[in-house]
Amino acid sequence: MATATLKMVTLDSSDVRRDAAFWAALLGWEPAHEQDEYAMLLGPGGLALGIGLVSDHEPPGWPNEHGSKQVHLDLAVADLDAAADEVVTLGGSLPEEQPGETWRVALDPSGHPFCLTSAAAWG
């Protein structure tokens, strides 16, 4: 049985409203939430695209000699604590700084950040 379900991919942005309008028009997805700091677009099958403000955002170059692409996954889980434990068991880690109560920032074994989110928040 899988521990998590991919529900959202989140992009870093220097202008959330601009990027939300672009992706909504390109994908034909509806905005579920939009403010200056964060936006979420809803797509088919419950998949979502998040766009988060990073005040000193620098777009990745292409080709990207450093390999940084500035995207992270949001995974819906039934039990946040159990999923966080599973991440650690599988070789990932949980950073000390955690910005919220209904999600956990986690790192894969190579250090890529992703979020575990309470499945209840997804309906």
Image: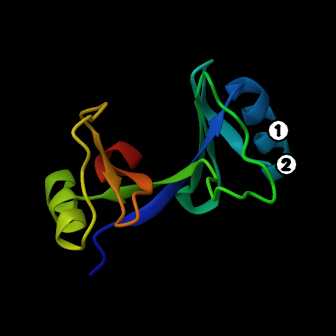
**Residue tagged 2:** 26
Q: Quadrant of residue 35?
A: top right
| Residue 112 percent location from the top left of the image | 44, 57
Query: Compared to 76, does 36 lie above or below?
Result: above
Q: Are there few (<14), some (14-19), or many (20+) residues within 10 Å of tag 2?
A: few
Q: Find residue 104 and report its horizontal and vertical position in percent.
A: 28, 45
Q: Which residue is mark 1?
A: 22
SS category of the residue bearing label 1:
helix
Q: Is residue 48 left or right of residue 7?
A: right
Which label is found at residue 111? none
The residue shown at (72%, 25%) is 15
Q: Distance between the Cα atoms at labels 1 and 2?
A: 6 Å
Q: Position of residue 72 (x, y in %)?
A: 52, 52
In the displayed image of the protein, which residue is found farthest to the front? 65
Asked whether the beta carbons under mark 1 and mark 2 sit within 8 Å of each other, the answer is yes
Residue 38 visible from this viewpoint: yes
